[in-house]
Amino acid sequence: MSDVETEAPADEQTTTETERRSTDAPILEIRDLEKRFGGIVAVDGASFGVERGSITGLIGPNGAGKSTTFNCITGVHTPNAGSVVFDGEEITGLEPHEVANRGLVRTFQIAREFPEMTVLENMMLAPKGQLGESLWRSVAPVARGEVVEQEERMRERAWETLEFFEIDHLAEEYAGNLSGGQRKLLEMARALLTDPEMLLLDEPMAGVNPSLEKKLLGHIHELQAEGYTFLLVEHDMDVIMNHCEHIIVMHQGAVLAEGTADDITSNEEVIEAYLGGDV
Amino acid sequence: MTARDDVSEALSRQPQWIRDVLLVGGIVLATYALFAVVGLAFGVGVNSIVGTFQQITFFAAVYALTALALNLHWGYTGLFNIGVAGFMAVGAYTMAMLTAAPDGSPPGLGLPLIVGVVGGMIAAAAVGFVAALPALRVRADYFAIVTLGLSEIIRRAMLSRSLRSFELGGYSIGSITVPTVELGTGGGSGIRAPSTDVIANYLLFAGGERGGDPTILGDVLFGLGGALGVTRSIMIQGTYTLVLIGFVVAFYVLLTRIAYSPFGRVLKAIREDELAARSLGKNTNRTKIKVFMLGCALMGLAGILWQGSRTLVSPNNFMPIVTFYIFVALIVGGSGSNTGSIVGGFVFAAFLWEGPRFIRSIARANFDVRAPPTIYDAFASLGSFDPMPLVGYLIGSLDEIRFIFIGVVLIVLMIWRPDGLLGHRKEIAAATDLSRRPAVTDGGETDE
Amino acid sequence: MSTVDVRGRVSDVTGQELVGAFLLLGIVVLVFDLIRQVVVGELSAGLLRSYLWSGIVDSLYIGLAAIGLSMTYSILRFANFSHGDLITTGAFSGWTVAYVIGGAGVAEFSSRILLRADGGAPPGALEMDVLANPLAIVLGLIASAVVTIAVALAIDRLIYRRLRDEGGIPLLIASVGVALALRYLIALFYTTDSRGVVGSAPEWEDPPLLPVEAIDLHEATLVFSAVALMLGVHLLLQYTKLGKSMRAMSDNKDLALITGIPTERVIFATWVIGAGLAGVAGYLIVLDRGTIMINLGWFLLLLIFAAVILGGIGSIYGALAGSLVIGITINLSLVWIPADMNEIAAFALMILVLIFRPDGLFSGVETA
């Protein structure tokens, strides 16, 4: 985390007019996104934007197309139509790793840890630009020195991040042995080590006990203060209403309403959609 | 030299490795001792005991080589490749076609052995690349069937009469004329190529010709053999086996370095959850292609060292069953562990492969165990309280019993011990020790 | 293979369609070439007819076995590598019963019980054909199904049941172990020698209404039995409650569990049908070919997998259609390629389908 903080101010001095404008523009913009599976239309022309540095919530009843939207943004699915723009760059239809390497990193509804790897191994996988991920560097005797140095630097960061999330006592445990909530923490900690600009969290509070939930929300706010952007899908309305500055409501594959918590709670259409008045 | 330094460096850093070397050494010595004691007790001569050791060690080495290569695919990356025999065939056949004599039947190119070996590895990697490009996208069980199908296509192509001998080239592109080259697979009768065990001749005889003056190593080994009453031919075979052990060590060092590296970490992540790895920015497809090609090249090399050491490279040595033997070896040792692959290769060779043969030769030498023509006759005499015909029949059918045994071992392992004999081994994929907490030690110590 | 196109239009769908189109184009070209060869006279109509007929015969026994493989693949969720050796089990058990019953008084019991493992009286002497020994042949057929079912159920109870929740790969590996153990257990009794066990097939000269000079009655028995059994499976799946449960479970096991379909009972039925048909297939293959060997089923296994995959795993009608494609492919390909390469064509087709149309050649068509 500290890396992001220290590097950011140096650049700010030289920011030009256009770049400043781009920082005002949404960091993530979805336009007319459409995804069909066979005859079923899961996402039907959804459009919305996420402000830089915000915590934005994405809600909607089951089957509203939230997860599919997430999958289309992160490259798991290729949308049938529409576009996804991240940080001024078109990323529609890119592979998941390409999206992640541009700084848009996700977590999953059911945490996807690497169960037969230790928590530390899970963490060490995440950082970008690892020299040792090239085959010859990891094998050739001469080139390995740099790899080891880099590994030691990453190890420090891995430990720091684990301490930040207060799961450092589990560092040498197999990730598969962790509880559901701990896995969620691990997944978020791991995502942070990739140095993302923005995190997409798919139901980060599902299966997390109340005290851990509070802690997790605290972490999210701290990270927001450091400059990260968050988009979360969440079912827990308290979390959404109390912690998200901006809320997007999806219904039947399209965006039904957008706004602050107050806007949403007073919106007739939203209430109707949730109460299941129609269809 | 550097390799040795690396090994010792790694050994000092990973005390587990020392334990592993001791473990492998202990299992090997205990097994030899067992065979020797049993053999001597039943009056087997030293020469044939040493011959059995040499056979066991040979098969242990080739199964360790192939199991290590397969471990890279399956144990580390989760690529369920059951076409190992096919990739071995590509390596061995390419080697044979490159090095066979041009006036032979089928004709080859007559190139030096080393060209054949390198060519075989490249060819196996290339076939792996072609297979990997589309196939890595499919599910694990589909991938298994694709690779099995591919290995059968390769074997049947080698078996086919229409490729027994063929001509390449003989046309011109612009001003360049490609000369006509005669090549062939030899069809069902195989291809006769210089055997890779000539390496042993070079080590033992001045000039590399069997029957020439022995080298210093030759003098020492033959002297030792003479003192124990072991024939020269066993010593020559044993020397080739030593060369194979050298390759096992090289494979092990290479694969262990991969295992303890960020690259190996990505491999493990692919095995555990590929989508999660991709979502963390890892280009898993490229990694899978790389690792598949490397594994195939190693399988090709193993095929060359194994089948290339026979006088004939023939299609029957690359039946799908060979792949399953390698799987048994890997599973016995525990997939995912390189040390396990070596232990598995050895245990498979000693107890499942050579053990039954050893028992048979002892039984035949010591008891009157002529086999009756059918099992019916054996049971019939059991009715008249004579168990010997049944024993004789079973001894005579030891090959079948061995296959049954291998099958049962595989089943038992899958049900009760899926992690292999060594159990679950914690091998952390990182180039450095992760457990050291930076805050406690000021991060001051970097052990390099 | 996508990514390049920004709009994401180059997705898997078009890639699959492309390969499908290429396959179709290839088939059209081959059909035209076939017509040309027949018209020009390079290929006699009689030869073409015999290729097609062998293709159909091959596809029938492959199809019988493929039904069971497809069912276990979709309901038990693993690629069963021991299915080929169930075929072998059926062949040996069925013919043993046929010999014990049929050859009484002609050959020694010790020879008959082990199917001439001692090289005893030849099948001709025992009059092992459908006309001379119909009762023995029919009882053998029934025995092949019964014994194979019993063996498969025992294996399931002893081995596969313990691994039910371990996922497809451990089960696949265990099934390889089962295949080895089962095959060589048979070999321990019957030896590994390949040998003739069926007398030469009686023929029906000048049958009415058919454009052939004579009908091989063993082949006719195979065709008749196979078609009847396939029809029976069809009726079972469509019109019984059990059949409907099986179809539901092959679609979605979890859903079937929730909706209260008794899983273990369906699994039991799967083995009964799958293994029974595999055993009969093995028996009929031997009836048609005349010889028996322990690698009989193992050598067929990959072709059966190919048929199942071509038809789309889990679809029984797909498996039958896939068998027809494979049967025709390995026979009709002889028009263009040498006989020892014909299985290469079938395997290549299988690999292409697995990679580019993993739901089978007929995916999109509504099947059971």
Image (cartoon, grey):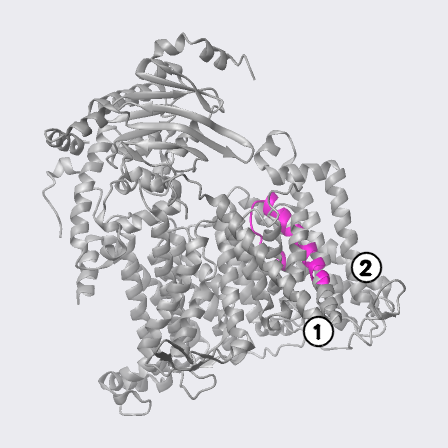
Q: Which mark is residue C139?
A: 2
First reached walking from the N terminus: tag 2 or tag 1:
1
Q: Nearer the viewer, residue B269 or B174?
A: B174
- Residue lying at the far top in this picture: please name it: A266
- Residue lying at the far bottom in this picture: please name it: B212
Residue A82 falls inside the magenta stretch: no
The picture places residue B54, in percent across and down from the top left corner, at: 38, 75
**Picture residue at 26% right of the left edge, 48% below the top:** B262
Residue that badge 1 annotates: C41
**Picture residue at 38% right of the left edge, 36% below the top:** A112
The picture places residue C99, in percent across and down from the top left corner, at: 79, 67
Q: Nearer the viewer, residue B334 or A73?
A: A73
Q: Residues within 10 Å of mark 1 (few under 14, many from 20)?
A: few
Element under disc 2: helix
Q: Amino acid at mark 1?
A: Gly
The picture places residue B309, in percent across and down from the top left corner, at: 39, 78
The reply, left or right, for residue A2 in relation to residue C59 is left
**Picture residue at 42% right of the left edge, 60% below the top:** B130
Q: Amino acid at mark 2?
A: Leu
Chain of the residue under the numbered disc 2 shown in the image = C
